[in-house]
Image: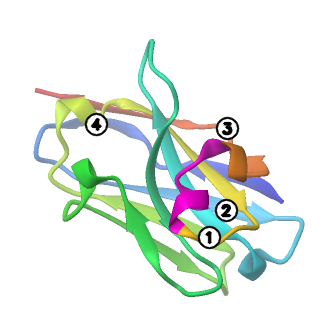
Amino acid sequence: VQLQASGGGLVQAGGSLRLSCAASGRPFRIYSMGWFRQAPGLGREFVAAASYRTSSTYYLDAVKGRFTISRDHDRNEVYLQMNSLKPEDTAVYYCAASPYCSYSDLTSTIKYDDWGQGTQVTVSS
């Protein structure tokens, strides 16, 4: 599946952004969708995921209560609503598609087959 992420930008601490990821090429509903981020000099970090089978959602502890992942099957899109942003949320954010559905799988980059190009999120203090 092809993925196109958008919605990043520069925002002040405490602000909000909504990332979008449009999917095409294969049936969207058979994939779990995840969001990862990568800050300069660091590895790619799991942020959130939505399982295709159970409709469960999973979050990095540091973003729980601030970020919300959702998906629109009619539009073939997945979203990441980010509220109360902090400077440490600054990173390039990637959306990804996975055929797996468990928490342990969806928090691992190697369980994702397809990746979007990334969108920069910068949070100023």
Most extreme residue toward the right is 25
Spatial separation of the CA atoms under disc 3 and disc 4 = 18 Å
Residue at the image point whose x is 63% and y is 43% from the top:
109
Identify the residue under disc 3.
117
Crowd band around label 2 with a 10 angstrom C-alpha radius: few (<14), some (14–19), many (20+): many
The reply to whether discs 1 and 4 touch (Cβ–Cβ < 8 Å) is: no
Sequence-first disc among 2 and 1:
2
- The reply to whether the C-beta atoms of the residues labelled 2 and 1 are less than 8 Å apart is yes
Horizontal side of residue 8 vs 5, given as left or right: left
SS of the residue at dot 3? loop
Is label 4 or label 2 in front? 4
| Cα distance in 3D space between marks 1 and 4 | 22 Å
Image quadrant assignment for residue 9: top left
Amino acid at dot 4: Asp
Residue span colored magenta:
103-109
Question: Mark 3: which amino acid?
Answer: Gln
Q: Which mark is residue 77?
A: 1
State how far apart marks 4 and 2 are (Cα): 22 Å
- Which residue in the protein does label 2 denote? 22
Q: Amino acid at mark 2?
A: Ala
Disc 1 packing (10 Å; few <14; some 14–19; many ≥20) = some
In the displayed structure image, the side of residue 36 where residue 98 appears, left or right: right
User: Height in image: 17 above or below 11?
Assistant: below
Residue 83 in the image: x percent, y percent?
21, 57
Task: Report crowding for label 3: few under 14, some 14 to 19, many 20 or more residues within 10 A (C-alpha).
Answer: some
Which badge, 3 or 4, is on the more N-terminal residue? 4
Separation of marks 3 and 1 at Cα, in angstroms: 15 Å
SS label for mark 4: helix
